[in-house]
Image (cartoon, helix red, strand yellow):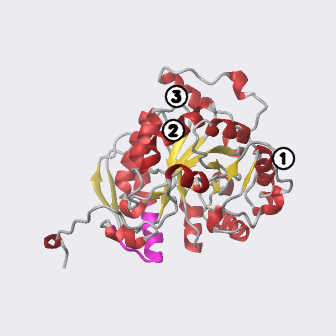
Amino acid sequence: MNERTQTLIGPSLVPEAGAWPRLAEAARAADAGGLDLLGIQDHPYQWRFLDTFALIATLLARTDRIRIFPEVANLPLRPPAMLAKTAGSLDRMSGGRFELGLGAGSFWDAIAAMGGPRRTPAEAVEALAEAIEVIRLMWSGDRSVTHEGRHYRLKGVHPGEAPPHPIGIWVGAYGPRMLRLIGRFADGWIPSYGMTSADVLRSGNAAIDEAAEAAGRDPPSIRRLLNIGGAITAPGPGDRSEPASTVGRIPSDLAGPPAFWHELLDGFRGLGLRLRGLAAGRGARADRAARARGRPAAPRDRLRAPRRPLDVAAEATGASGLAPPVLGQTDAVGLSRRVRGSHRRTCGADPIEPPTAPWPGRTTDLPGRRRS
C-alpha cells in the first residue's frame, strides 16, 4: 500500500492563544504517536487566535515527522506570492513536512476590516485560480517569473529554489465553480462534514472527478480530506454499536472509541471517497528527514505494529489533555474530531465564534488615515 491509497490520520487544532501550551503538547504527542498530519485553522481576524503560520513554524521545529498545514490559509489576507515564499521556507526548514491548505475567503466583513478585499463569489473563484498559478510559479525554480492577472501580478520576480518536495495545494470550498477549479488545478479537497452532508460530499466528489478528467488529469491523484466533528473516547459500556448508520447525519458532538470510528469510516465508502485502507506508518521520507536533523528514525517494529491509526490517535492525543480533532487525508476518507467540547472546557471559548465578536479591550480609531 502506497501513500496515495492510505488513509492518513492526524489532529486538527484551533490556534487559541490561551491554549498555546496544550497545542504544543498535542503536536508533540501526535508526532510521537506516529500520526501523519496536523492541520491548523487560519482566521487572522479572530483576536483570540495566534497567527497560524507563526504557530506552524514553531510546531514544525518541535516535531520530527508529522506534516503540518494551514486548514485553510486565508487567501484574501495572505497574498499568494508571500504564501508561496512562506510555504517554501517552512518546507525547506522542516525537511519537506509542510503542505498548503488554501481557502478563497469567507467572513468578508472581518476580512475588509483588516484591509482585505471584499469579493463576490465569482471574483473569489477567479482570484483563487490566479493564486494557484502564482504559487506554482513561485515554486517553479525558474530564474524569473511573471504573471499578469486581474487580482495578482508578478513582474520579473526571482523566486529562488523550488521547495524540497512537491507541496500539495488542498482547497477548502463547496460551490460548483470551486469544485470544478479543484478538479482542474488543485491537488486536494478539504470539506468539513459539519458544513455539508453526505449528498454534497458524493456530488462534490463526482464534480471534481469530472473536471479532472476533462482537464486530462487522473481523478484519484486529487487527495480528499474530510473533517468530522466528534471525539475519540476510551472503550467502555457506552460504546455505540452502529456507527455506519450515522453517515449522513453526524452530529457535532459525536463520540466513540477507536473501533466506533473505524466502522464509521467504512460507512463512507458509498460517498465516492474511495476508501482504500488504514495505515499509520510514518514513511521513508519522514525517516530521512529525521535522520538529516540528527534524530532517530521510527523503529521498524513500531511501524509494523498491528494497532490502527485511530488507536494510536486516541493514545497520543489523550496525553495532551486537549482532545484535538482527528483528520484523515489522501484519496480516502479521514476523520477529524474538532475541539468544540473540550475546547470550551479547557479555554472557555467557542472555536467557531464569529470573527467579529467584540474584543473587551480598547479600540483606537485614526480618522485622519481613513480613505475617502
Q: Which mark is residue 153?
A: none
Which quadrant of the view contains residue 302?
Answer: top right
Residue type pointed to by label 1? Pro
Q: Nearer the viewer, residue 197 or 274?
A: 197
Residue beneath disc 2: 97
Estimate the x, y position of residue 96 in percent, counting from the top left: 49, 36
Provide the secondary structure element on which disc 2 rests: loop
Spot the residue most to the bottom.
372
Identity of the residue drawn at 47% across and 37% down: 60
| 362 over 97 or under it: above or below | below
Q: Earlier in the sequence, mark 2 or mark 3?
A: 2
Which label belongs to residue 289?
Answer: 3
The answer to whether residue 7 is left or right of residue 21 is right
Number of numbered callouts drawn: 3
For marks 2 and 1, give the CA distance.
39 Å
Distance CA(mark 3)–CA(mark 1): 42 Å
Q: Secondary structure at mark 1?
A: loop
Does residue 150 appear in this view?
no
- Which amino acid type is marked by label 2? Arg
Which secondary structure dominates the residues rendered in magenta? Answer: helix
| Discs 2/1, front | 1
Q: Residue furthest left?
A: 368
Q: Residue furthest right?
A: 241
User: What span is in magenta?
Assistant: 116-131
Res. 312 image quadrant: top right
For this view, does 336 lie left or right of residue 351? right
Q: Residues within 10 Å of mark 1 (few under 14, many from 20)?
A: few
Is any atom of residue 96 visible in this view? yes
